[in-house]
Image (cartoon, rainbow, N blue to C red):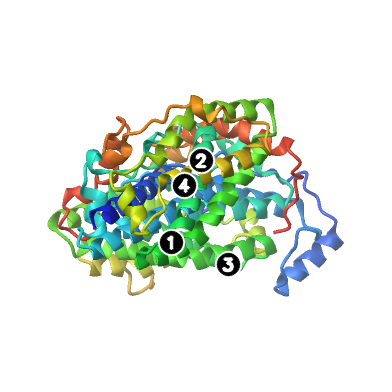
Amino acid sequence: MYGGGNTFEGIQTESLQEDPEKLAAFEARIDRGEKIEPVDWMPQLYRKQLIRMIEQHAHSEIIGALPEGTWITRAPGFKRKLALIAKVQDEVGHAQLLYSAAETLGKSREAMIDDLITGKSKYSNIFNYPAYTWADACFISWLVDAGAIVNQLANAKGSYGPYCRALERICAEESFHLKYGHHCVIYLATGTARQREMFQQAINRWWTPMMHFFGPADKISTHTQVLMKWKVKMASNDDTRNQFLDMYVPKILELGFTIPDEKLKKNPETGRWDYTEPDWEEFMRVINGDGPCNKERLEVRRIAEERGRWVREALRSSKTAYVTPLA
Amino acid sequence: MQSLKELLYKIADDQLILGHRNSEWTGFGPLLEEDIAFSSMAQDKIGQSYALYQILHDLGEQAPDTVAFMRNANQFHNCILVELPNGEYDFSLIRHFLFDTAQALRFDMLAESSFQPLAELARKIKGELRYHTLHANTFIKKLGSATTESINRLQQSLDFALPYALGIFEESPYETELIAEGIFAGEKVLREKWIEKTEDIIKQTSLHLPDWHTITPITGGRLGQHTEHLQPLLDEMSEVFKIDPAAEW
């Protein structure tokens, strides 16, 4: 997990005039498929947008650890318990990798976490919804991770070296999460009536947030075009959503579950999926702080940060020197 | 046979319950690296408890899932130290240090056990526990000598935890038998080794240990007498499992 669709609005570009020669050389490198490294020259917009994107992704990993993490202590049986701890631990490890990748662009982990807690920077919207049952945790492990893999595989082909390398490692681990999640769901699907019903209800609860996960349809602005040209944004939100539906709707139906959208079907003419537009007003409302769990998620993070402050201060005060990560 | 089972149960229960407590840190650590460390130790401990319950199963006890998820608090023989809530990080760290120092020494001893399945498993577990004690010692040394706040916090937690830590070594009714049969060299021997090791690490910090004779051990755990904290932990652990114990999850 857990990176979802990114929002690319909101960075002021007027003051970002760049040296045309350097810019041309930078763009030529990207065209040749070269990776940009931390020490290389890069446009300010590129740097800012990458920080925002990697930071959002890192935050999504640590916030995403919360809804699943609450099921570690309740996982049924040794096999599930051990696998779920390992999985959630991986996600926290991904946050560590991603914060390090973002730090190479000049923003410290502390500053990023401060921005998370104050609500200045976002995380994947889907984690503002609660995981009520074990089946919800299984939905996240299988399908939310699946959605994240679709996004991350696209982003791993981007132009910024440290982010791509982090994503390659992350995707390798995610493939195990996907197998774990799918395995859990197969057991629910082939289990008792109650187990099947638990997962059907999870689908019903999570379908709208899952459709939201890839973000609203992109506005084709010059801004977006530049970011695609620089290989910061690798695929449109609609494309990744469509790819997810292509890969996973048949698998869900195959297990005998239904999806709560009567319009959902593949259009034979366009080769793409038709579906009911999820409620984008709800999406905007939740992303701006008014979702079922926004307050709780940030509060948990804030308390963890506050309770841990003395530890971080003590570690800094001892003889351990801070080393700038070189991702 | 009963003496061996009793020994296996208490060690397995210790590992399971502390593993569960460690796993509660996932997502809440004071820094990401500690979050990850406690999750790793949780996996090791829960995995170790599984392997020990598996030996018990081979000796005719119920399957590991049933034993772990279906017993009540009074059937658990873990020491009380491991069932206490995590509290603040200072307590979790001190408990981790005190308990894992003992556990590493215990498995060193068990590696010499006359009961071969246990000796073999202990040799494997020893290797894992080396990282747990390395982690504990590193953080105790760092935080135990850093700021006034970190030293005070660790000292307070140490003072609070020591009576419970001595409860780790509560003797079983079968102690003489275990020693005579060469299965385990006994809690008294372990306790002496533990005191020596603990003193060695604490000496390297700004923390201090009280005179051992002034501490009254808090015991009862090995006999199934627990605090009010254990049953809620078990209820939470088995919440999904008990929806339908016959179902496969």
Q: Mark 1 points at which residue?
A: B122
The CA span between labels 3 and 2 is: 39 Å
Tell me the amino acid under the disc marked 3. Answer: Glu
Query: Contact, CB < 8 Å: mark 4 with mark 3?
Result: no
The subunit letter for the residue under badge 2 reads: B
Q: What residue type is labelled 1?
A: Ala
Q: Of the residues under marks 2 and 1, which one precedes in the sequence?
A: 2
Measured Cα–Cα span from mark 3 to mark 1: 37 Å
Q: Name the residue under label 3.
A: A168
Q: Which mark is residue B98?
A: 2
- Mark 2 lies on a secondary structure that is helix
User: Residue A68, position in %: x, y?
Assistant: 39, 48
The reply to whether label 2 and label 1 mark residues of one chain is: yes
Looking at the picture, how far across and down is residue A276, in whole percent?
Answer: 32, 55
Earlier sequence position, callout 4 versus callout 1: 1
Question: Tag on residue B190?
Answer: 4
